[in-house]
Image: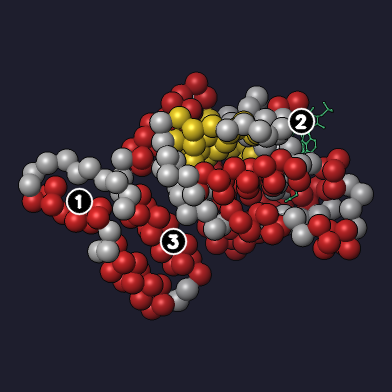
Amino acid sequence: MNNYQYINAWVDDGIARIELNRPNVLNALSRSMIAEIIDSLTHFDTSDDVKVIVLSGAGRSFAAGADIKEMAEDDPISLEKLNQFADWDRISNIKKPILAAVQGFALGGGFELVLSADIVFAADQTKFGFPEVNLGVMPSAGGTVKLSKTIGYRKALEWLWTGERMGAAEACELGLINKVTPPELLMEEILTFAGKLKEQPPLSLRLVKDTVNKALDLSVYEAMQYERKNFYLLFASEDQKEGMSAFMEKRLPNYTGK
Ligand code: CAA
């Protein structure tokens, strides 16, 4: 599956790969590239042969942000009519696990794309940051929201106001990413993790993701009610019967995603 101009997209044994592919501009996220990323995510989300999606960047960078050259002449009305963030909103509707393997730079919109992923591994020299303030603007694809919800008000303002870059180790300590790896092991480690998820019951993964996302928005009481309903729902699945039978029969489960 690769009718795309700005990304490479393919499936390898249950794992879908989306590789940003404008290495000459450090994978700056042009609008067409974002549209292709969303199109491929949406396609993989409904493909039965895909269990997990892995995002990565070709060349020396994951993504150095939105394409500055493309947006330099924008005005509020052109932006309103373009409605480009409707595309970004669609990422939060993807139900399957999205993993990101990050190296080089993840700045601005590139960092926002990272924060849209569910699990993130980064090479140890990776730099993350929101440099928008240095361009006279600010993040616009959820950066302020996700950063402040993850690391808290004051830490978030510090990074957003200064536009400074944080290293992978600090991003990991702050809970923004899951793991730091040597660069040469980045893809191997993320694919190993993807391989583990691939063996898990897909409906459980899906409803866990859905429930954790709700937990970030709802009150504790509402989130717990929501959790319960999803727990009940899983008892309608064949995989619940299989998982519990396998336990009782002392054998490995064979999940089908049904
Ligand atoms: N948009 C467009 N082009 C970009 C780009 C971007 N965000 N980032 C890098 N490039 C281009 C450069 O212009 C350069 O192209 P040319 O060879 O044609 O000049 C090429 O990529 C390589 O970049 P550098 O020569 O600058 O590489 P470097 O290693 O010296 O520096 C960098 C790397 C520090 C990441 C630097 O490129 C940089 O500061 N980039 C901009 C980062 C930025 O401000 N990102 C935020 C964008 S705004 C945003 O994302 C808004 C949002 O929330 C939606």
| Rendering coords of residue 41 (x, y %) | 56, 45
Kind of residue at badge 1: Gly
| Spatial CA span between label 1 and label 3 | 21 Å
Q: Which is more foreground, mark 3 or mark 2?
A: 3
Q: Residue at x 14, y 47 (%)?
A: 246
Lower position in the chain sequence, tag 3 or tag 2: 2
Q: Residue at x 8, y 51 (%)?
A: 248
Kind of residue at badge 2: Val
* Residue at the spot of label 1: 243
Lower position in the chain sequence, tag 1 or tag 3: 3
Crowding at mark 2 (Cα within 10 Å: few <14, some 14-19, many 20+): some
Q: Residue furthest top?
A: 184
Q: Is residue 153 visible?
A: yes
Q: How is the image coloured?
A: secondary structure
Q: Is residue 49 above or below residue 132?
A: above
- Tag shown at residue 25: 2
- Tag shown at residue 210: 3
Q: Which is more foreground, mark 1 or mark 3?
A: 1
Kind of residue at badge 3: Asp
Kind of element beneath mark 3:
helix
Is 86 on the left-hand or right-hand side of 225?
right
